[in-house]
Amino acid sequence: MTKKLLSVLVSMTMILTLLAGCGNAGTPETESQQTPEEVTAEEPTTEETAPETEESAAAEESADVGELTNEEIKIQKVNAAETKGKEPVLDINEIYGLSPEGDLATLAGDLQLTEEDTAKIKDGNFKVAICMHMLNNDVNVTKTNLIKDTLESYGVNVIAVTDGESNVDTMISNLETVMAMEPDLIISIAYDVNAMVPIFEQVRDAGIKLVFFECAPAGFESGTDYAALVSTDYYGNGRFAAEYMAYLLNYEGKVGIAYYDADVWTCNQRDQAFRDVMAKYPDIEVVADQGYADYNQAGVVADAILAQYPDLDGMYATWDVPAEDCITSAEAVGRDDLIITTVDLGENSARILAQGGMIKGIGSPRSYQDGTAISMAALYALIDKDLGSGYIATPTMGCTQENVLDAYKVIFNTEPAAEIVNVWNENNGAE
């Protein structure tokens, strides 16, 4: 797998074109997405909504009994999403997780701009910088391309796009650089929610507006310290990975968890969701729950789990790159029958799904919709339009061999590569 780390790209005037290889595998075929003049963060449409609607109704009914905390509402929704032996809903229209502050989400589709709003933005001569934590995977590249294209379609000058290369010190340096360029707003992520507090305090105190995606700094409050936090439903991603695992195992067996052992909210949420769902099923035993601080060591953890539990039935990894290392570990001991589920759809994981490989289910962010939602939140913030609670979320897309081609289109808003299509056709009897 090729990982291409991009260096810091900063310029007051240059137009940045993002190329990326992916921690997942490769890059989408298209380099950028076409963005219409009027953008709405649309909610997904689906023909397969009935089971999810029933689950939502059950959750709402249980939530009406007494005064429940948001955390209790979350768990009740997870418990109500009982598949009862049926394949879990793939095209999901429910938000299961909470914000880092424990807030319920506003659906991204609720954000819309009027003609008057659009005129204000175009007349504002606004400058925005995008400071990413990593640009080595399909999800982040798609998201960043779309944010940039959308903002520019409204006349916003995107003065910088930076790559933190998965390193907090690099991110801090990048933020210091773009602060000197005096943007009106910075779009970024608190890659380490504690270590990055001081730099984001400097940004805030300089009068630069902040829109975060996925993680905000510890102690920061929406509406006061930043305009909005936009995130996919990472808890929902992990929930789907767990429900699909349980379904494939017929709700019994031994499962191992190989998780990313770092204080990263987006990862911690999906991992906890997997554990919460497994706890629903008394005949499924989580026999190993082991972490890796360096994701390049995921295979070492998988080796250890398989050595201790050679009869393991399923394994979960925090995202698809470590999941691929788990595949290598399983193949090395002749366990081609091991069931693996994970989070994030990329080029390699899409191909593995298409060919019926060991990765059987993926709870994926909707990268295109995430990018649109982040763009909309930034546009709202530039003109001081109300963002409600400040937590904006998009739902999970469940991916399996059956729907991977259609899921890819929804996630990336582009056709999958010919190789993936050909692999799917070869393994599904299509001509």
Image: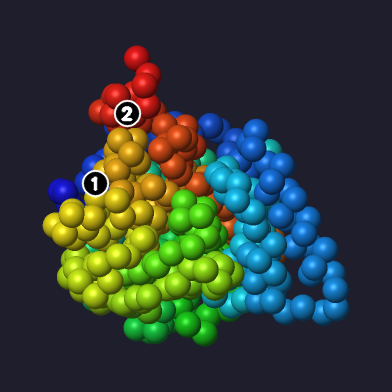
Q: Is residue 366 above or below residue 131?
A: above
- The part of the image, by quadrant, that contains residue 291 is bottom left
- Percent coordinates x, y for residue 20 in the rendering: 24, 46
In the picture, measured across the screen, residue 145 lies left or right of residue 423, that is right
Q: Is residue 124 visible?
A: no
Q: Is residue 180 above or below residue 368?
A: below
10 Å neighbourhood of mark 1: few (<14), some, or many (≥20)? many
**Mark 2 touches mark 1? (CB < 8 Å):** no
Alpha carbon separation for disc pair 2 and 1: 20 Å
Q: What amino acid type should be assigned to the residue bearing mark 1? A: Ala
Q: Residue at x 60, y 35 (%)?
A: 38
In the picture, measured across the screen, residue 21 lies left or right of residue 282, that is left
**Residue 427 numbered tag:** 2
Q: What amino acid type should be assigned to the residue bearing mark 2? A: Asn
Q: Residue at x 42, y 73 (%)?
A: 286
- Percent coordinates x, y for residue 137 in the rendering: 29, 51
Q: Which residue is mark 1?
A: 25
- Percent coordinates x, y for residue 189 in the rendering: 41, 67
